[in-house]
Image: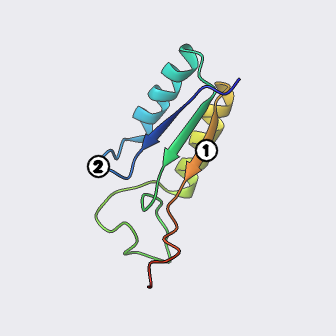
Amino acid sequence: MNKGVFLCLSSNANLKVESLRLFIDYLALFGYDTLELGLDDMIKIPEEPYYGYLRGGYTIQELSALDDYAREKGIELVPSCQMLGHFGR
């Protein structure tokens, strides 16, 4: 069964990791099995300090730990990023 939620974190919804864990708890309680996170520029990239500048965001380690937590709860975490393939045009 695929019963999931898309949570857009890049549109002024920069939640703390603890809040995301609580959200995962509720999804598991209500029988959901998928959480797609709209991250876009919310991933912190050390080599690109201006990517998502002043927006907060999540480190790879935080996202990995969140994925492990979701898996323990029976939820597949699916990252979603807009890659802006035609941005230079």
Image position, residue 42 (x, y; %): 42, 57
Instruction: Say left or right for 54 vs 30.
Output: left
Image position, residue 39 (x, y; %): 47, 53
- Tell me how many marks there are: 2
Give the residue type at disc 1. Answer: Val
Instruction: Say left or right for 69 vs 59.
Output: right
**Quadrant assignment for the C terminus:** bottom left
Instruction: Say left or right for 73 vs 46.
Output: right
Residue at the spot of label 2:
12
**Residue at x-position 61% and y-position 48%:** 64
Give the residue type at disc 2. Answer: Asn
Give SS at disc 2.
loop
Give SS at disc 1.
strand
**Residue at x-position 64% and y-position 24%:** 73
Instruction: Using the image, determine if residue 43 lies above or below residue 71.
Output: below
Q: Residues within 10 Å of mark 1 (few under 14, many from 20)?
A: few
Q: How is the image coloured?
A: rainbow
Check whether the beta carbons of the residues at disc 2 and disc 1 lie within 8 A of each other.
Answer: no
Residue lying farthest bottom? 89
**Quadrant assignment for the N terminus:** top right
Between disc 2 and disc 1, whose residue precedes?
A: 2
- Residues 2 and 76: in front is 2
Q: Residues within 10 Å of mark 2 (few under 14, many from 20)?
A: few
- Residues 2 and 66: in front is 2
Instruction: Using the image, determine if residue 51 lies above or below residue 75.
Output: below
**Residue at x-position 38% and y-position 41%:** 16
Residue lying farthest right? 1
Q: CA distance from mark 2 to mark 1?
A: 19 Å
| Residue 53: assigned label | none
| Residue 78: assigned label | 1
Image position, residue 15 (x, y; %): 36, 41
